[in-house]
Image (cartoon, grey):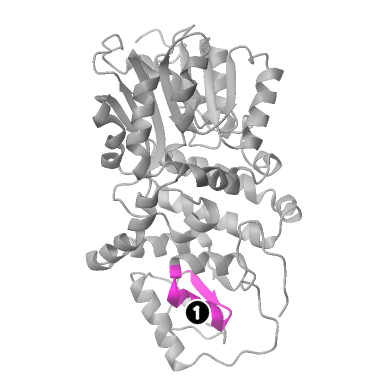
Amino acid sequence: MKTKKPHLLGVPLEYQLDQAGEQSPPTALEKELMRLILKGLGDPAIGVTLWDGEPLSPTQKGPTMVVRERAALWRLLTHPTLHFGDDYSTGRIEIEGGLLAFLGRAYDAFYSRPKSVVALQRIADAYRRVRGNPLDQARDNIHHHYDIGNDFYRLWLDEDMVYTCAYFAPGVETLEAAQEAKMEHVCRKLRLTRGETVVEAGCGWGSLARYMARHYGVKVRAFNISHEQIAYARDRAKAEGLDGLVEYVEDDYRNISRNISRNIGRDRYDVFVSVGMLEHVGVKHYRELGAIINNTLKPDGRGLIHTIGQNQPIGTNAWVYQRIFPGGYTPTLREMMDIFEPYDLSVLDVENLRLHYARTLEHWQQRFENQLDTVRAMYDESFVRAWRLYLVGSIVNFTGGYLQLFQVLFSRPRANTLPVTRDDIYRRDDDESV
């Protein structure tokens, strides 16, 4: 057995290619088990070739999954949604005919399975949703994904290191312009006014906080528990002369209300904003988040939550959950209402930017592919393959409509000063006709 160190995503040591001689051909039982696996996944329109090089079906067409080792087949039998990702990452499974086409067909079949099969999956997923993302584990979960290293993300994100859905407004083509357009879109929805105070829950590398301060003259207090991201954000704010308007706090969002007394000049905030953080909160903690917002906002305050979501309450893919985003869950709109309803917060506007995220991911994936040699030298081939699977799989999920991107604007119930139409949000600076 050739052993290698486990790569950064934590795939166990046993997921290494076995170099110890020839394997015996697949048995009739193993071929039948492979057919059962495919049936359980919804009979996707894909081909399968086992380690003897023979197609499972002589008439198979389209993208093909090549199972290179017997052990990989048996792992697929026990937990296909977890072990496919692990064995693809380590090369025990190969895809011929294009990963994007393969995953598109696989997801189409998976999400079209009989309701009885889906019901069983939801029971299995319930534990993850109920457990949520407890405070004592949240930091480890964030570290697993976001503290991989700023140098890695710098290779394929935009210049401002924005790791959330961009907004491809009319005429916007580049990733840099689209990310700036997203930040402007958020600011316009919030109708920010110079001198207001903003609290941000989960600020990433701090780009939105700096944008709000620079272009709208607001004071921002931004919370994040990723040490690397906070260090980067503080350095950028200082270099740009914004450290007097922006304060980055290395702390969990659950401690925002405890810091009210230390607020930058006001007892409470005018605005609450969270972009790309709710996916890490967990449904169990939504009422707690609502209480924090309620305790944080002024009597006429307002806010916006930007999050990946879905139409049905289905648990996160097991491989993504364990290897990429531990603790992650994407809510339905109905589940999100647990944030707002108990505290009489009024939902003013809901926008779905699903296809904008698909396009964002296409930019990320292309940039990632352009940096393969560098990424491979920084980590290893398994890491490269895992992140390719994650990015391409995400593209398929958004283009196929299995994932959504919700922006939810809300306010206190009697905040009557906001415009009654969307005209100001979409008006271009050079357009005086609106």
Camera sees residue 277: yes
Residue under the image location 53 percent in, 24 percent down:
222
Q: Position of residue 287 (x, y in %)?
A: 32, 35
**In what quadrant of the picture does the N terminus appear?**
bottom right
Residue 341 picture quarter: top left
Give the residues drawn in magenta, as a range.
63-80
Disc 1 crowd, CA 10 A, few/some/many (<14, 14-19, 20+): many
Q: Nearer the viewer, residue 102 or 115?
A: 115
In the rendered image, the vertical position of residue 71 relative to residue 285, given as above or below: below
Q: Position of residue 107 (x, y in %)?
A: 39, 61
- In the rendered picture of this protein, how many numbered marks are placed on residues? 1
Residue under the image location 44 percent in, 8 percent down:
193
In the rendered image, the vertical position of residue 418 relative to residue 6, given as above or below: above
The residue identified by callout 1 is 73
In the rendered view, does 372 fall on the left or right side of 45?
right
Amino acid type for the residue under numbered disc 1:
Leu
Q: Is residue 182 magenta?
A: no
Q: Position of residue 152 (x, y in %)?
A: 68, 44
